[in-house]
Image: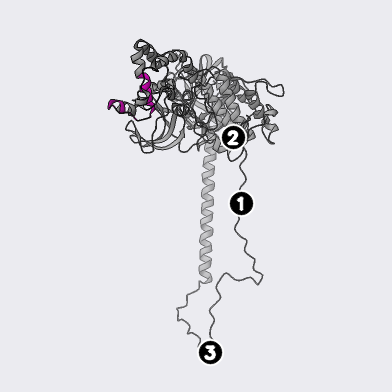
Amino acid sequence: MADRTRAAVDVVAEEGAGGTAAVPGTSDDGRTAPGSRHQESDRSGEREAVKSGEADTADAAQEGASLEDVPLEDAQDDDAKDDNAKDDDAQDAGETTPGSDQEAASATEAPAEKANPEKTVPEKAAVDAVPTLRPAPVRHSGDKVADRYRLEECISQAGVFTSWRAVDETLRRAVGIHLLASGHERSRAVLAAARSAALLGDPRFVQVLDAVTDGDLVYIVREWLPDATDLASLLAAGPMEPYDAYQMVRQVTDAIVLAHRRGQSHLRLTPKSVLRTDGGQYRINGIAVDAALHGLSDDEAERDDTRAIAALLYAALAHRWPYPEDKYDLQGMPRQLGCVPPDQVRAGVHRGLSEIAVRALCDEPPRHLEAITTPEELAKAIALLPKVRQPEPEPVAAVYPPAYPKATGPARSPFPPPAAVPPHAPAPAPAVSRPQARPGRGARAAKWGASVVLLAALGVGSWVLASNLRSQGDNGSTTQGQSAGVDDDKPTPSKAPAKPLTIVGAAEFSPHADPMSGDKVQYSYDGDPNTAWITKQFHGFPNFGNLDYRADGAGIVVDLGSVKSVSAVKTTLYVAGQQVDVRAAAENAASPRTLADFPRTLQGGTNAGKQLDVDLSAPVRTRYVLIHITSLPPESPGLYRGGISEIQVLG
């Protein structure tokens, strides 16, 4: 009886958890799990001794069952479930169910205590030392957790835990919840993983909002993304375009690299755990928590996560799952083919992405390629790829109004025809009006004469005025020419043109975080506009992802070596549309690092094009000049990037 119930304790449902079913009584790493039947068999010698003493004293007929009908390991199972509330209530009331495991266990234990009480205590302590494997808590839609979270829909159900979509009635928002028995051996690891994942604080990961033990229940509350679609659903429509696959693998790899730098790993990265929002941003669900829920170890965390990212890229390019089994509505690859690049599975696959997929997926990649074993190496390989361009949008056909047929008859007058007069109708009487007097020849001659006189007067006046002005100009120019010796035909001399000042060094402006591309700073003043210092790609918001440690933006600080008079700053930007201002440090500034160290603004924030030229009306004395970027242009929907190609300071 207990054999049948215990077998379902630690079996993970394939559909619910997205993984393979665990073998009952074994841990995920292949070792014998504490509390398994194999471990229980080691104690069989002790129990047989107890059993032999019990056979003479137990009254099996009175209890309704014999010792042979109930194995001793069932008694251990019942001891391991002493904290079940329902059983406790029944024991407190002194009630037992006829034929139940509890009654059989009591029939087994009671004679043992009478026959050999000193043996019973060590045996009970040994049984209590075995970690419990409690099943997933039973909950239903409409139940509340912690008097706050109302369960709405069960998303997945496993032997160890259940996952729900719920409503936070305090903040009136949707959340996701994992439920786990607090007495389970994995509960402490799950809580620790959830609290550690909550400290990542990176928008590329689905955020953990709460992790609490409440009585016999452990619940993990996470962010819910109603506008996101998992990668498995996206691939149901077919393979991804090269640009979309490139964006997916680049964003996921960058996120996993950050997690590993902070001591976190995923270990269960699947198409179900990678989500894409409506804005095109990819987010990763279950960092650290999924592995703890399934009891996975992180012995080869870097290799496992690298291989998992490669499997996602392979599926996106070839529309096939790279392993023999069919998963996530994708057909698996035949085992006998080995490791085949995606561009040999489907035509039109980007060769560079295909090679990266097999390099990270296979231990011995084909084509004599070098294997990629860590997320850092994978990120570098992706960065070295030629830029995968976004496909051009399909042209929209112009819609013209329909052409009207031309008239073939005689041309019509635009004026309405005169009203027809009936043939027998009397002609209308002419209107009586006073005839106007026509001007005579004398009047016309007078008008012409007045006009001629007026024109003559204007001509004479203009000639007199011009003569006076000419005489004054001649006198003034002669005097000025004699005194200054300057010819009127020559232009007035201007100030000397500004000359480029030597830039002796530069640094990335990043006051609250590590530099993004500190090793590329020299490209911003190397004299080559084809090279550039480029920011990382930021997600969701143009102000550097709305991250707290990027609140002051980024940029380049150039060092002129000593205090110089600066009259102009010319900047070639990596891409148009960046919000840029130009600042100068004080004359006595030494190694300025924050915005407060650049009090003088040479150019206020402006939405710059590819070229930003700042000409100062008066020179400014400074040694350090900051090209400060506060907002980035979109590189693709929901993704932002900027940079600086060339800086020139003149004085």
Say which residue label 1 marks: 398
In the image, 261: left or right of 144? Answer: right
Closer to the N terminus: mark 2 or mark 1?
A: 2
Q: Alpha carbon of mark 1 to alpha carbon of mark 3: how far?
A: 59 Å
Picture quarter containing residue 312?
top right
Q: Which mark is residue 244?
A: 2
Residue 440 sits above or below residue 455 on the image: below
Query: Residue 33, position in %: x, y?
Result: 49, 19
* Image position of 509 with respect to 207: above or below: above
Where is residue 194? Give x, y as percent. Answer: 43, 24
- Numbered disc 3: secondary structure: loop
Image marks 2 and 1: residues in contact by CB distance under 8 Å: no
Q: Earlier in the sequence, mark 3 or mark 2?
A: 2
Camera-nearest residue between 173 and 321: 321
Residue 340 appears anywhere in the view: no
Task: Say few, some or many: other residues with alpha carbon within 10 Å of mark 3 (under 14 / 14 to 19 / 20 or more).
Answer: few
Where does residue 517 sit, x and y in percent of width and height?
55, 21
Kindly identify the amino acid type of the residue bearing the numbered disc 2.
Answer: Asp
- Rounded to the nearest whole Å, what is the CA distance between mark 3 and mark 2? 86 Å
Q: State the CA–CA distance, disc 2 to disc 1.
A: 29 Å
Highlighted range, magenta? 90-109
Q: Quadrant of the N terminus?
A: top left
- Is 421 on the left-hand or right-hand side of 361? left
Q: Is residue 100 inside the magenta stretch? A: yes
The amino acid marked with disc number 1 is Ala
Q: Nearer the viewer, residue 136 or 556?
A: 136
Dot 3 amino acid type: His
Secondary structure of the residue carrying tag 2 is helix
Q: Which residue is mark 3?
A: 424
Q: Is residue 411 visible?
A: yes
